[in-house]
Each structure stands twice: as C-alpha cells, then as structure tokens.
Amino acid sequence: MKNNKKALTVGLLTLLMCFIAHTGFAQCASFAKNVGKIKLGEFVHDGNYNATVLGAGDTAELYKTFFANQKYRVAISKIENLPNIHFRLVDKENNILFDNQEHDFTDVWDFTVESTQMLILKLKVLDDYDMETEITQGCVAVLFGIEKEKKKKKKK
C-alpha cells in the first residue's frame, strides 16, 4: 500500500510538472503570436512561432534554412523587464553574418542571402541587470518573415 501511495504521488507530481511546462509553453506561443508578430511589419510570417522561457545568462540556438535572393526579417521579442537579448546570425562555419551587439541590441534585422543555406541564430539573454527591478526569467520569441512579392505593373 505504501508503494502504491508513493507511486501515485510521484505520478501526480510528474503530471503537474508536465502541465506547468506545457502551460508555460502555451503562454509563450501566445506571446509570440500577439507581441512578436507585430514586429514583422509588412513581411509575411513564415508560420513558425519559435518561443521559449529563458533567464538571464541563458542561451539558445535556432537552425533555419534560408533561400537565395529572398529578403527576410528576423524579429526578437521578450517580456518587457527581461534584460537585452544578444543575437547573432552565423553560417555553418560559425562566420558571423550579423551581430546585434554592434547595432545597440536591435531586435529586428532585414537581410538577403546570396545562396540557399542553413543559418544558425544564436541568442543570449544578457545578465547585466538590476536585481531589484529586472525580471530574471521570461518568454523570448523569434519570428521570421519573408518580404512580400511586389506586384508588377501591367504594360499598356
């Protein structure tokens, strides 16, 4: 009987932890849709909502294929009180194509690649924050948009 109670308790705790993790992910996905998508402006969202909970000092990587001669926008969103997000876009040889630290930690960047290739977006939540006023953990979303095709004028 004791083993059954212990197994039931462990099972309920596991279920509760899964529910909390799922709820946190669902809230982050909602954040990405409601807050992050706005930053894409006139760019067409690629349909993927990349979002997770990160804390000060945490890092994440996102791998994505980009197609030649297509203009893209990457937009990073975070909860308001989270420290700045440092992001870099690198190729498979780890050559830095863009580093937002060199651009006052901008959260939006437009770019075009010359050839179809997989690139890596490397994120880091900075840990230079005021412990009394800053939140140390929260939702971070990364969205990609593709420039709309410009309509060609018909010749008369």
Image (cartoon, rainbow, N blue to C red):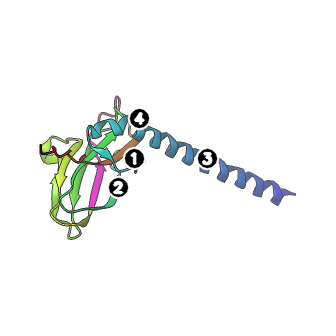
Disc 4 crowd rating (10 Å Cα; few below 14, some 14-19, many 20+) is few
* SS of the residue under disc 4: helix
Q: Which mark is residue 124?
A: none
Q: Are marks 4 and 3 in contact (CB under 8 Å)?
A: no
Decide which of 54, 154 is in the foreground and name it: 154
Residue 75 is situated, as x and y percent measured from the top left of the image, at 28, 44
Q: Which quadrant holds residue 93?
A: bottom left
Provide the residue designation for mark 1: 54
Decide which of 73, 12 is in the foreground and name it: 73
* In the displayed structure image, the side of residue 66 where residue 104 appears, left or right: left
The span from disc 3 to disc 1 (Cα, nearest Å) is 18 Å
- Give the magenta part as a residue range: 120-134
Q: Are marks 2 and 1 in contact (CB under 8 Å)?
A: yes
Task: Tell me the amino acid under the disc marked 4.
Answer: Asn
* SS of the residue under disc 3: helix
The span from disc 2 to disc 3 (Cα, nearest Å) is 23 Å
At 21% from the left edge and 65% from the top edge, which residue is drawn? 91
At 15% from the left edge and 58% from the top edge, which residue is drawn? 97
The span from disc 4 to disc 3 (Cα, nearest Å) is 22 Å
Comes first in the chain, label 2 or label 1: 1
Provide the residue designation for mark 4: 34
For the C terminus, the quadrant is: top left
Task: Tell me the amino acid under the disc marked 3.
Answer: Phe
At 37% from the left edge and 45% from the top edge, which residue is drawn? 141
Please identify, in this view, whether the residue under mark 4 or under mark 3 is nearer the observer.
Answer: 4
Task: Tell me the amino acid under the disc marked 1.
Answer: Leu
Task: Tell me the amino acid under the disc marked 2.
Answer: Ala
- Residue 133 in the magenta stretch? The answer is yes
